[in-house]
């Protein structure tokens, strides 16, 4: 196989440091190690710029250099003849390299030392192998074209968003073999992502939130690019101040955040944006206890799956114009309500809902639940439609990208986990039934 950058992508994972040789203007040579060589495309790589060193001074004076990279599985060495083009100090490339460097720094015990100042972009003018006897090549990548074809067929068969998201996590588990993963949907009204589905965790974490720029998920979302971390890292973890908002509102002592469902010993992570055209609708996140679990081939495969999910989700969210033709099953007889009354409180400021002393949900999903409870209490209504929710100003859906179906999935799953006496049952496209199995006492807490 002829040598090219795509063939050598495994050499750019950061598992083995690369070396760079440069010369000053007067011809004095210098050789040093570099933390990260990042694959940009088939003609370019980017090197991490962390501090003003002799290497940095040399490439500014004389832009030609030689980089030696090592394949982490075979030990084969390759020589890249490169030419410096520019330095990027912000943007997708910078954010991706920053996240990856954080993983390398944590793995090497150098947090606070490995700080990225810029991404130096180089054009690769030639690639050659260094003579030697490499080890046997590893097996073919797990995410191949045949596997992707099977997975995409299963995703295309989904007839609603909930089935689609579950199918995505199912195909990641089998046949791809990724056991810990989750899907988060974007809430533009609150500028945050909320977890709607997960696999492999003791607690589902449905409703747990991440904001743009926070952790690997937030960084990938902000830059709209996939980001992989091959080693454990604390910089891109999810430690959060759980009570900041509660204290600001005078609600100290009330749990109002849902713990994020992460692995305690995560060694590899990947976050991929789910796009519908140019619109960001969610994020796919996976992790593993094995270092280096997600390579470039897995990244490509995840991007294909996420793009397909975005396209299918966009089709599913469009309701047909005019009256909904799907028949709704006849409303059941009044369901018996047994047990002690549920005391449900709504905090008007952000639609936080508490059942007893336990936090349940907030935001648009909380507003939807409050509307359903009011309709049950005041009108004895059980059957509802997505369209009526969209037309109700009290719910405060955003004008664009309202993701109503995803919010109903979030609410239904939170109720199933935390309050089974309240249940949402889908009865047709754009229609659902709200079950209330215990007496309910409602109370509103004003601003």
Image: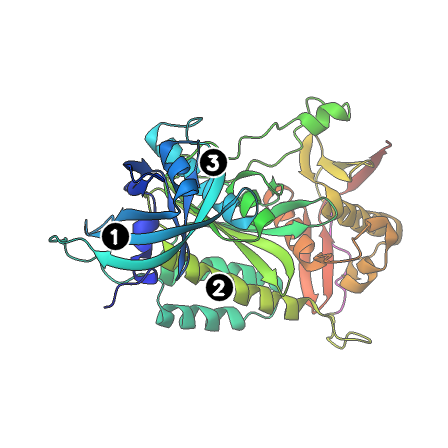
What residue span does the magenta drawing correspond to?
Answer: 330-337
Q: Which SS class for mark 1? A: strand
The residue pinned by badge 2 equals: 305
- Is any atom of residue 251 visible in this view? no
Q: Residues within 10 Å of mark 1 (few under 14, many from 20)?
A: some
The answer to whether the residue labelled 3 contacts the one labelled 2, judged by CB atoms less than 8 Å apart, is: no
Q: Residues within 10 Å of mark 2 (few under 14, many from 20)?
A: many
The residue pinned by badge 1 equals: 79
Q: Which SS class for mark 3? A: loop
Q: Residues within 10 Å of mark 3 (few under 14, many from 20)?
A: some
Indicate which label's residue lies in the foreground, 2 or 1: 1
* Residue visible at 55% across and 55% down in the picture: 273
The circle on residue 416 is none
Where is residue 150? Give x, y as percent.
41, 71
Whether residue 334 appears in magenta in the rendering, the answer is yes
Where is residue 251? Give x, y as percent.
74, 25
Where is residue 413? Give x, y as percent.
61, 50
Q: CA distance from mark 3 to mark 1?
A: 24 Å
Q: Nearer the viewer, residue 128 or 327?
A: 128
Earlier in the chain: of badge 2 and badge 1, it is 1
Indicate which label's residue lies in the foreground, 3 or 2: 3
In the rendered view, does 139 fall on the left or right side of 54? left
The residue pinned by badge 3 equals: 116
In the rendered view, does 149 fall on the left or right side of 421? left
Where is residue 398? Give x, y as percent.
78, 53
| Residue that protrudes farthest toward the left in the picture | 133
**In the displayed structure, would residue 287 be above or below residue 9?**
above
Whether residue 276 appears in magenta in the rendering, the answer is no
Q: Which SS class for mark 2? A: helix
Earlier in the chain: of badge 3 and badge 1, it is 1
């Amino acid at each position: 196989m002829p040598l090219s950058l795509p063939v050598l992508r495994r050499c750019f994972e950061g598992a083995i440091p690369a070396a760079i040789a440069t010369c000053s203007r007067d011809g004095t040579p210098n050789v040093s190690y570099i933390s990260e060589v990042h694959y940009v495309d088939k003609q370019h790589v980017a090197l991490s710029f962390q501090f003003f060193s002799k290497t940095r001074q040399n490439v500014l004076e004389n832009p030609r250099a030689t980089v030696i990279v090592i394949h982490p599985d075979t030990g084969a060495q390759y020589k890249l003849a490169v030419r410096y083009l520019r330095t990027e100090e912000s943007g997708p490339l910078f954010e991706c390299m920053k996240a990856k460097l954080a993983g390398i720094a944590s793995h090497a015990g150098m947090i606070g030392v490995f700080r990225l100042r810029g991404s130096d972009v180089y054009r690769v003018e030639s690639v050659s192998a260094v003579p030697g006897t490499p080890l046997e090549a590893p097996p073919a990548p797990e995410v191949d074209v045949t596997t992707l074809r099977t997975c995409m067929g299963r995703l295309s068969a989904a007839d609603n968003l909930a089935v689609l998201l579950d199918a995505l996590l199912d195909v990641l588990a089998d046949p791809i073999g990724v056991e810990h993963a989750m899907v988060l949907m974007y809430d533009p009204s609150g500028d945050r992502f909320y977890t709607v589905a997960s696999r492999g965790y003791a607690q589902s974490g449905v409703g747990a939130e991440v904001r743009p720029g926070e952790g690997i998920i937030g960084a990938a979302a902000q830059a709209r690019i996939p980001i992989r971390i091959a080693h454990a890292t604390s910089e891109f973890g999810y430690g959060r101040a759980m009570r900041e908002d509660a204290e600001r509102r005078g609600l100290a002592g009330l749990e109002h955040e849902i713990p994020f469902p992460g692995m305690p010993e995560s060694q590899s992570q990947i976050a991929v944006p789910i796009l519908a055209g140019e619109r960001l609708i969610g994020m796919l996140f996976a992790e593993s206890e094995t270092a280096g679990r997600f390579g470039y081939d897995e990244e490509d495969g995840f991007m294909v799956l996420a793009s397909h999910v975005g396209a299918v989700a966009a089709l599913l969210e469009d309701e047909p114009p005019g009256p909904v033709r799907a028949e709704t099953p006849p409303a059941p007889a009044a369901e018996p309500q047994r047990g002690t009354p549920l005391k449900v409180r709504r905090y008007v400021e952000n639609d936080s809902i508490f059942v007893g002393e336990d936090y349940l949900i907030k935001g648009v999903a909380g507003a939807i639940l409050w509307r359903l409870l009011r309709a049950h209490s005041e009108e004895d209504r059980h059957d509802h439609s997505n369209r009526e929710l969209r037309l109700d100003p009290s719910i405060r859906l955003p004008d664009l990208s309202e993701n109503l179906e995803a919010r109903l999935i979030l609410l239904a799953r939170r109720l199933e986990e935390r309050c089974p006496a309240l249940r949402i049952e889908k009865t047709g496209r754009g229609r659902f039934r709200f079950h209330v199995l215990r007496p309910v006492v409602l109370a509103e807490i004003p601003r």
